[in-house]
Amino acid sequence: QVQLKESGPGLVQPSQTLSLTCTVAGFSLTSYNVHWVRQPPGKGLEWMGVIWNTGGTRYNSALKSRLSISKDTSKSQVFLKMNSLQTEDTATYYCARDRLGDWGQGVMVTVSS
Amino acid sequence: DIQMTQSPSLLSASVGDRVTINCKASQNINKYLNWYQQKLGEAPKLLIYNTNNLQTGIPSRFSGSGSGTDYTLTISSLQPEDFGTYFCFQHNSWPTFGAGTKLELK
């Protein structure tokens, strides 16, 4: 059974770095791509970036300077790091597999002092 | 970046209605267009991938069509569980979502 689960801090201070983990089960990160998508409260979805099964990455151009996605295939984990957080980065962050057919439950991150 | 213009932003309909939601891309996206349904407090659910392919487990009342820059999601006969917000998503290049269509009970 395919599963994805995001984890990370619920509260981050402005200007700090956000670190999230997506732990997957039921498939191998060497065979499938994993995307990160976020959604501010009451708003739409924003594609953030992807890590390919090969390990390559592609990022949303609006976030590229602040965003990094990596993975540890042996631990079945994908990592998101985004620096210089601001209040507008408050959102639910999701990881999703491949063509965004399988999603995690999401993790709510609030940026506030 | 490719812009996705989704319409309408709000759609009021009744059970049994046939409804359509549209997405227009700012350039040709070669049918790399997915549709998602999202309910409050839940992750989005994939309905249709690559314009007209029904995701496993999705009822056949959902269908997709389109080409080039213009794409449509159709629900042939609206059911009570279909109310929610729908998003299109292009993955031809530098993926982007549409702004969403909230489908509400009339």
Image (cartoon, rainbow, N blue to C red):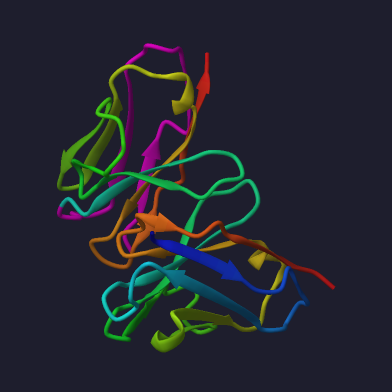
Q: Position of residue B63 (x, y in %)?
A: 24, 32
Q: Position of residue B37 (x, y in %)?
A: 43, 40
**To which quarter of the image does residue B48 belong?**
top left
Q: Is residue A75 above or below residue B103?
A: below
Magenta part of the chain = B1-30
Q: Is residue A69 visible?
A: yes
Q: Residue placed at 34% from the left, 52% from the top? A: B89
Q: Is residue B12 magenta?
A: yes
Q: Is A112 colored magenta in this rendering? A: no
Which of the two residues, A91 or A66, is positioned nearer the viewer here?
A: A91
Q: Which residue is depicted at the point 78% across and 77% down? A: A13
The answer to whether residue A111 is above or below residue B99 is below
Relative image position of residue B32 (x, y in whole percent): 21, 54
Q: B38 and B13: which one is in front?
A: B38
Q: Nearer the viewer, residue A13 or A86?
A: A13
Q: Relative to residue B59, is residue A103 drawn left or right?
A: right
Using the image, determine if residue B88 lies above or below residue A104: above
Asked whether residue B11 appears in the rendered view, the answer is no
Say which residue appears at 62% left-offset and 71% top-offset. Answer: A7
Which quadrant, please, contains the N terminus of chain B?
Answer: bottom left
Where residue A101 appears, as percent x and y from the top left, is 35, 54
Disc tally is 0
